[in-house]
Amino acid sequence: MRILLTGGSACGKSTYAEKLAMSFPLPRYYIATMRVYDEESREKVARHRQMRNTKNFITIERDTDIHLIRLPRPGTVLLECMCNLTANEMFDHYGNITDVYGKIIYGIESLASQCENIIVVTNDVGSDGGKYDEGTREYIRTLGKLNISLAERSDCVYEMVCGIPVVLKGRLL
């Protein structure tokens, strides 16, 4: 089963994704893509690890190159989140931009081939009508293209609105 969860910031995607993952049998793998770059991000990662501590997730922290992940056995994968992964892959330490669409899709396909269920969390970007610099516009285009591809490949697609999953494709699980 392939599931894509999308929505705006702080709309309940992560909470729902964890709840959904916990409804599937063990093992449960949490692929955490947040890049740790300062004390605040270290504290956030530690807080999130603690929150998952009782939920029987095996956490794999990987901010790039998810195609290199090898799961010890099939189960459920929760990939959190496409926004971080895409930014981490796209922009180097100097702000140079790399085309990462193929690499990221390959990585997700690699994970999907190793598990029974995969839940991917992403954000709805680009619908705010804001004016952005070229690098940000390229990021929005890339993430949008990835989201379209993932939605096409998914059995279920949900948009989270105020903590409520709205079915865009498939059925509510």
Image (cartoon, helix red, strand yellow):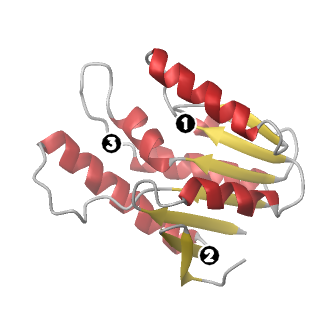
Q: Secondary structure at mark 3?
A: loop
Q: From the image, tell me which residue sits under label 3.
A: 99
Q: How many marks?
A: 3
Earlier along the polypeptide chain: callout 1 or callout 2? 1
15 vs 85, left or right, is right
**What is the CA distance from the residue labelled 1 to the residue labelled 3?**
18 Å
* Depth check, front residue: 167 or 1: 167
Residue drawn 33% across and 25% down?
Answer: 92
> What x and y, as percent, mark residue 25?
89, 58
Q: Is residue 143 left or right of residue 60?
A: left
Marks 1,2: beta carbons within 8 A: no
Q: Residue at x 70, y 38 (%)?
A: 51
Residue type indicated by callout 2? Cys
Residue found at x 54% / y 67%: 163
**What's the distance in space between the residues labelled 1 and 2, CA to CA?**
22 Å
Q: Position of residue 158 (x, y in %)?
A: 55, 73
Q: Amino acid at mark 1?
A: Thr
Q: Which mark is residue 142?
A: none
Q: Nearer the viewer, mark 1 or mark 3?
A: 1
Q: Earlier in the sequence, mark 1 or mark 3?
A: 1
Sort mark 3 into few (<14), some (14-19) or many (20+) by Cα contacts within 10 Å.
Answer: some
The N terminus sits in image quarter? bottom right
Q: Is residue 70 visible?
A: no
Q: Quadrant of residue 22?
A: bottom right
- Picture coordinates of residue 15 (x, y %)? 63, 55
- The residue that label 1 is drawn on is 33
- The residues tagged by marks 2 and 3 sit, at their Cα atoms, a distance apart of 27 Å
Location of the C terminus by quadrant is bottom right
Location of mark 2 (residue)? 156
Give the amino acid type for the residue marked by disc 3 in the picture.
Asp
